[in-house]
Amino acid sequence: MYRPLHPHIYHLKESFLDPRFTQVVEYCRSSSATEQGLSNLLEEQPAPRVFRLPVFNRSFCEQLLEELEHFEMSAVPKGRPNTMNHHGVLLDELGFDEGFFTPLREQYLQPLTSLLYPEYGGGSLDSHKAFVVKYNMKEDLDLSYHYDNAEVTLNVSLGKDFKDGHLYFGDMRQVPLSDTECYEVEHRVTEGLLHRAQHMHGALPISSGQRWNLIMWMRASQERNTLCPMCNRKPTLVEGHGFADGFTATPTLCPTLPVC
């Protein structure tokens, strides 16, 4: 039912990526790559183990925003990104998963996450949920303190003109709020923030304009098959569509990824 405005952006090309990002990925693919060496190439934020990195170039971000706005204006039924964000787009509904986000995760992001977050499944990410959220003065302004249904999260600022709306990070979800110190982290268009998904965080309100963010929840079934990160119990599974919630009944054999 939906006719894309920019069909060429549905398949990942290296020309969409910031050259600085591809240089970092090349380092991670080398046999001499280390966590410390990678950390030296990234911009570590005040919040522990939160890293800023250039991801896309501005031209791609602008074309993706045009595509998303074109989709928003269409009559095609649309799902909500998640239970907290009321405005945005589920990118698998548009058909971005197979040609764009799967190779982005497998070929470009996992070399980084395997070095930065090995104890959180960073080396075995086998599914994802990708979506875009929109903040607007007449819609969602902010996002309350939460953690993500994932093992590792990438959050990329796509634009548009906006003021304020920084992210803030506390501690891991197991740490009581009374023992937590929060740190603000600025959003910069075309750049991403990479962090552990169970790291508590939120978004402060924008004071003007409109902001679009691309979120990629990356999941490792070998981690979540043992303990569901949302309910802290061994998951009870039902079959889901596509990547669903990233669980697998038999990690190496099951072609479906059920939900808990």
Image (cartoon, helix red, strand yellow):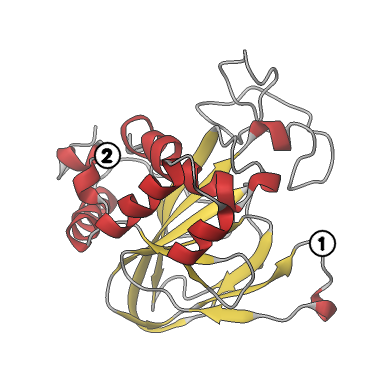
Image position of 201 (left or right of 185):
right
Question: What residue do we see at 68% from left, 56% from top?
Answer: 198
Residue 171 lies in what quarter of the image?
bottom right
Q: Is residue 174 above or below residue 119?
A: below
| Placement of 156 over or under 208, stated as above or below | above
Q: Quickly name the residue at label 2.
A: 12
Q: Which residue is labeled 1 in the image?
A: 174
User: Gap between marks 1 and 2, in whole Å?
Assistant: 36 Å
Tell me which residue sits at (36%, 46%) in the image: 26
Q: Residue furthest top?
A: 253
- In the rendering, at what x and y percent does residue 79 appear? 45, 45
Apparent side of residue 138 relative to residue 176 in the rendered image (left or right): left
Residue nearest the observer in this picture, 215 or 195: 195
**Residue 199 image label:** none
Q: Quadrant of residue 94?
A: top left
**Residue 183 % position (x, y):** 61, 80
Determine which quarter of the picture holds residue 226: top right
Residue beneath the point at 64% across and 22% down: 239
Q: Quadrant of the N terminus?
A: top left
Residue 92 can be seen, yes or no: no
**Which element is circle 1 on?**
loop
Which one is earlier in the sequence, the residue at label 1 or at label 2? 2
In percent of width and height, residue 225 lies at 74, 31
Which residue type does callout 2 highlight? Leu
